[in-house]
Amino acid sequence: MSHYSVFSVLKGGLTSQRNWSRAWRDPAPREAYDVIIIGGGGHGLATAYYLAKEHGITNVAVLEKGWLGGGNTGRNTTIVRSNYMLEDNAHFYEKSLQLWEGLSVDLNYNVMFSQRGVLNLAHSDAQMDAYSRRGNAMRLNGIDAELLNREQVRQYAPMLDFTDNARFPIVGGLLQPRGGTARHDAVAWGLARGADRLGVDIIQNCEVTGFHIENGTVKGVETSRGPIRAEKVGVAVAGHTSHVMAMAGVTLPIESHLLQAFVSEPLKPFIDGVVTFGAGHCYISQSDKGGLVFGGDLDGYNSYAQRGNLPLIEHLGEEVCAMIPSVGRLRLLRHWAGIMDMTMDGSPIIGKTPVQGLYLNGGWCYGGFKATPGSGWVFAHTIAHDEPHWINKGLDLARFREGRMVDERGAGPVPGAH
Amino acid sequence: MFQFKCPHCGLRDANEFTYGGDATIAWPDLGASEQEWFDAVYQRENPRGPHREYWHHAGGCRQWVVVDRDTLTHEIHGCRAASETQK
């Protein structure tokens, strides 16, 4: 497995690019592993990577039903930020952002993490008050936040509607300069290569069809490629968390919902950072290829279909045009949907389950992509030590029963409302 | 777009309706145990397939309906007045 460097690129140029080897192996599953991770998306791969790197546990298999990063890892809008107000979320997402900052070097793989800033727009004085409260909470937790007035927002994002007849006049905004975007496919590939180089087996086209559980302790999994034994099994399957955990007899406080995302035809450089609409729910940025990447609310009903419906598309189009009227004639290039496992408080679940040796990483709602390295890092710690790290202690499954909600939006136990 | 055959208004577009969640949950008595309340308020079967759910015809007759819909294929198998499904 070659190390990527300027020399390997030069060598490629001199050898008709015949020097490159496979980025990761394609092993057949063995009979037993120390740890099995179900789900070969960003979170599962990051977990395997950090299990090997931080905890020296290399006898690990990542089982993926389809292909790497074919679920929500490749379906998000690639935004990375840590602008959360509540303690449990703030520390967790900030840990993740810090890992993002070193990820390309750490993995020897360019995940194209670009700290171009994330700006939340405010359209009323009350919203400015709420943002100053959130910004202060962030700064008390050591996270960068800047409150911008209208003129500062105009300098940062001049394409927004600053005319006198704007439907939602811009009052100011909250900026997290260290936020940004990353290339989501590269994240899956880089983590897969990194984990593989440390000895992890990445097994694609291997669907888990059941668990072996004896006396409340996990003993292994049943798969489409035969049974595999392991004393520890981690589940990181994004939108299908309820479906997989039901095989282990565990019911969860989760509903699966659709979230659509969109890419426009490419433009010349137009939007520098990530801008979010404050009068609705819409977030927009520009990819390195020039397309505007944007998304908004959930479709609003339970679904596993990975495709959305037209009312939401119309609604989102209206929001984008209210923010940036100049894109009114821009054509959509593609749109798609991913399945969000929405929890009852809008925050993720990372920790132990009622089954000994079975660990859960799910309920990511909107927050999965930005959490990728942090999620893998704390989940690896949780699996290795059979105890959560202090960073994910408050994001456990038991919090719902014990009334310790981490409800950033204050929406209550209505998954579709978060 | 989904269309629901509202028992009061006929076939209507889904954007006249607001989603009301899982219709199979039975709310426990006020004196029920914490476990029963926890199950009803937080725990969801979240099926990948047939799902019975409430929708509110907010942009129409303002009545609640119970829809049988498949969460994997989005097929709609039935729509009844919620009042008929109550005891």
Image: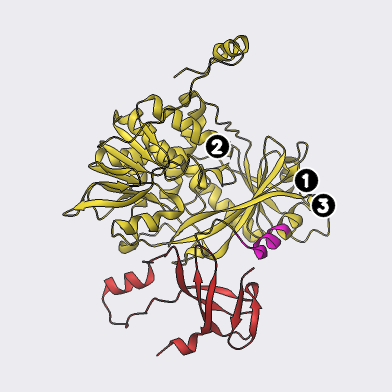
x, y percent for residue B77: 52, 76
Disc 3: host chain: A
Graded by Cα atoms within 10 Å as few (under 14), some (14 to 19) or many (20 or more), the crowding at tag 2 reads some
Residue farthest toward the left in the current orientation of the protein: A215
Residue A362 is tagged as: none
Q: Residue sitting at 57 percent across and 39 percent down? A: A179
- Residue A329 is marked as 3
Q: Please name the amino acid that badge 1 sits on.
A: Met
Judging by the rendered image, the residue that carries numbered circle 2 is A185
Which stretch did the figure color magenta?
Answer: A308-317
| Front disc: 2 or 1 | 2
* Label 1 secondary element: loop
Q: Residues within 10 Å of mark 1 (few under 14, many from 20)?
A: some
The spot of residue A284 in percent (x, y) is 67, 48
Colour for chain B in the figure: red
The stretch drawn in magenta includes residue A316 = yes
Q: Is residue A135 magenta?
A: no
The residue nearer to you, when weighing A2 against A88, is A2
Which amino acid type is marked by label 2?
A: Asp
What secondary structure is the stretch in magenta mostly built from? helix
Dot 3 lies on which element? loop
Q: Quadrant of residue A9?
A: top right
The tag earlier along the polypeptide, 3 or 1, is 1
B7 shown above or below A47: below
Q: Are marks 3 and 1 in contact (CB under 8 Å)?
A: no
Give chain A's shade. Answer: yellow
